[in-house]
């Protein structure tokens, strides 16, 4: 994956999980984190997040997972 595929325009913004399609995640509704960057993975937009509670290193899938970006 080339550096060009990474988008840092949302880096540093806060994000709150509403729902995740990952049935194995330990994250819960309302968990908060800080966006690191987003990237394209085989045509799917993913958002890399540093979660506050360190329960997970899960990236969210923009078209599947539900979340709120907080300004």
Image (cartoon, helix red, strand yellow):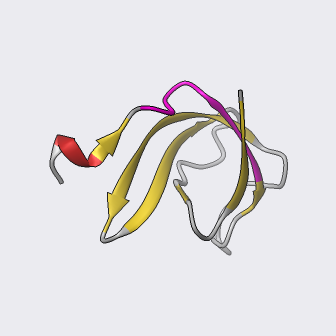
Q: Quadrant of the C terminus?
A: top right
Relative horizontal placement of residue 63, taking residue 71 as reference (left or right)? left
Q: Is residue 59 magenta?
A: no
Image x and y of residue 40, in percent: 34, 58
Residue 57 appears anywhere in the view: yes
Q: Please identify the residue farthest to the left as the structure is shown.
A: 2
Residue 51, given in percent of the width and then of the height, sits at: 63, 38
- Closer to the camera in the image, 23 or 42: 42
Residue at horizontal 56 percent and vertical 60 percent from the top: 62
Q: Is 24 situated above or below 4?
A: below
Q: Quadrant of residue 25?
A: bottom right
Along the viewing direction, whichever of 25 and 36 lies nearer the viewer: 36
Is 63 left, or right, of 8 in this rendering?
Answer: right
x%, y% of residue 67?
72, 52
Q: Is residue 26 visible?
A: no
The picture places residue 59, in percent across and down from the top left corner, at 52, 54
- Residue 28, picture quadrant: bottom right
Span of residues in magenta: 9-17
Seen at 61% across and 28% down, the residue is 13
Q: How many marks?
A: 0
Q: Quadrant of the N terminus?
A: bottom left
Q: Pick whichever, 26 or 16, lies toward us.
A: 16
Check the image and report above or below for 53 versus 17. Answer: above
């Amino acid at each position: 994956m080339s550096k060009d595929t990474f988008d840092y325009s949302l880096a540093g913004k806060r994000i709150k999980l509403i729902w995740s399609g990952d049935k194995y995640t330990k994250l819960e509704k309302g968990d908060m984190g800080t966006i690191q960057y987003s990237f394209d993975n085989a045509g799917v937009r993913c958002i890399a997040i540093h979660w506050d509670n360190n329960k997970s290193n899960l990236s969210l899938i923009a078209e599947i997972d539900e979340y709120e970006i907080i300004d």
